[in-house]
Image (spheres, helix red, strand yellow):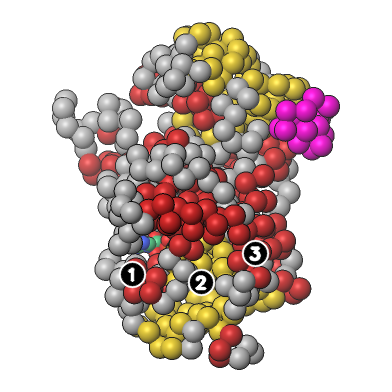
Amino acid sequence: MASPTKELVRTANLTKTYADGTHALTGVDFSVTKGEIHGLLGENGAGKTTLSKILSGILKPTSGEIYIKGNLVRMKRPSDALGLGVGMVHQHFALVRPFSAFENIVLGTDLNPTGERAKEAKASIMELAKGVGLQVALDTPVESLSLGAQQRVEILKMLYRRVDILILDEPTSSLTIKETGELFKSLLKLKEEGKCVIFITHKLREVMDFCDSITVLRQGKVTGRISKSEASPITLARMMVGRNVEFELKRPPMTPGAEVFAIDNLTLLDKAGKEVVKDVSLRVRRGEIFGIAGVEGNGQTELAEAIAGIRRVARGSIRLKGTETGGKSSSVIRRHGAGLIPEDRRRMGLILEMNLEENVILGKQRDLQFRGSLTSIAWRKVRQFTSDLMKKFEITAKGPESPARSLSGGNQQKVVVSRELSSDPDFIVAAQPTRGLDVAATEYIRKLLLDSRSAGKAVLLISAELDEILQLSDQIGVMYEGRLIGVGAAETMSRETIGLLMGGIAA
Ligand SMILES: Nc1ncnc2c1ncn2[C@@H]1O[C@H](COP(=O)(O)OP(=O)(O)OP(=O)(O)O)[C@@H](O)[C@H]1O
Ligand SMILES: [Mg+2]
């Protein structure tokens, strides 16, 4: 048991019930000591973000106590938490995109970013950044920074406020392997300085490598607290899910059928007219998963956008069942038989303000099965359809009328995937389909993609998770600097070969 002075955070019997009656946390006893990286694990919807938001003053608990550095505290707003040294970096960044990194860091403090003390402040941020290895171009607008750099801005923002309890909610879910490595170096430095980090992730490998101890939540309750030496991926997964998780999926042998989807010499441009996808060609057949590996930011996002009809094609063609779909709208492409699972489900897959049934018929408003009279939607049918989907795809939410925003990340993704698969498409493009998902939901979505393959669909999988590519794909190619390189049958490509190609090195 840690001595109370070393205990930076403790909660006793913490409970949170949301206004709609959802019990997000029940009787949570949680603690973190000085100089520790503490992993907070749990399935989607387990209550990790809720707990973090309570600790950082964004939400008020329904009951229970919070001790910060040994003192019982009552926080009413984030500034109270910051004053006590607690700061949180959110699962979805909250930066002001047109503002520079520097402006974002000082935003909300009493410093005027164009005033006299700005220069001093900038120098001190630079020093702070250097000290913990979190360098960023301070004068660059946040919207032109990479996701990794944006995250460094968020962390610096907290450190600038002298936070010594740093909560990171899934900080690595959209970072490259290199950026993740750099982030951990910085976190280790913070730990040496005697700060503590509460680290939320679904990646068990990271937990095993970097966390000193781990608390696991399941359905709002603590199922255990263990030290790293006691933990293994299998025990952690079992604590999270309450059953054994299959890390190895079976990919039954399949003979691919006719070609369904083809891209020829596709070139795409960014806003500035620079080529971000260069002369890409590929083919996907029925009963086949074509996996595109690669570090994020090498053109995959743009490629997926063009396939989904939300990015202009500069040159080349995209064909679905022989028909050119390049330049067509998403709804036309869907009606032509495509399931589109976008990378950024919160921006493109769902409309968070709308409820589940509205989201489920997004893009299907003209679908005859939901038609009432000529111009109206039969909401009763939609509701039935939605609750059937919720059952079939094990979507945890109160009901079809729950707002999409209130669902956990994993359940939001299940809504998108279930909607896209429910129209029985011939072709599915799935971009980063398991990003941010817990082990059970990841297993589930991967199985669905394999089932789609067995059902004779053509699947294009775009993923930065090498394991996912290797588990699911029949053919593999790697995106590197806008080009698709090293395309070949999965059996002929080793993990090492793909890893090297991801770094631009031909094996
Ligand atoms: N504003 C809200 N209103 C109602 N229920 C909510 C709200 N926010 C979250 N919930 C519910 O509370 C529970 C816990 O959600 P929370 O976001 O804390 O989970 P999580 O562990 O962070 O999940 P994930 O790994 O998907 O991010 C879930 O059942 C979720 O649907
Ligand atoms: Mg969360």
Q: Amino acid at mark 3?
A: Lys
Asked if residue 394 can be seen in this view, the reply is no
Secondary structure under tag 1 reads: helix
Residue matched to label 1: 79
Indicate which disc residue 189 carries.
Answer: 3
| Quarter where residue 379 is shown | top left
- When the figure is inspected, residue 143 is found, relative to residue 320, above or below; the finding is below
Q: Amino acid at mark 2?
A: Ile
The answer to which of marks 1 and 2 sits earlier in the sequence is 1
The answer to which of marks 1 and 3 sits earlier in the sequence is 1
Say whether marks 3 and 2 touch (CB < 8 Å): no
* In the displayed structure image, the side of residue 116 where residue 416 appears, left or right: right
Identify the magenta region: 490-507
Asked if residue 1 can be seen in this view, the reply is yes
Residue matched to label 2: 165
The answer to which of marks 3 and 2 sits earlier in the sequence is 2
The residue carrying pointer 3 sits among few (fewer than 14), some (14 to 19) or many (20 or more) residues within 10 Å by Cα, namely some
**Cα gap from disc 3 to disc 2, whole angstroms:** 13 Å
Say whether marks 1 and 2 touch (CB < 8 Å): no
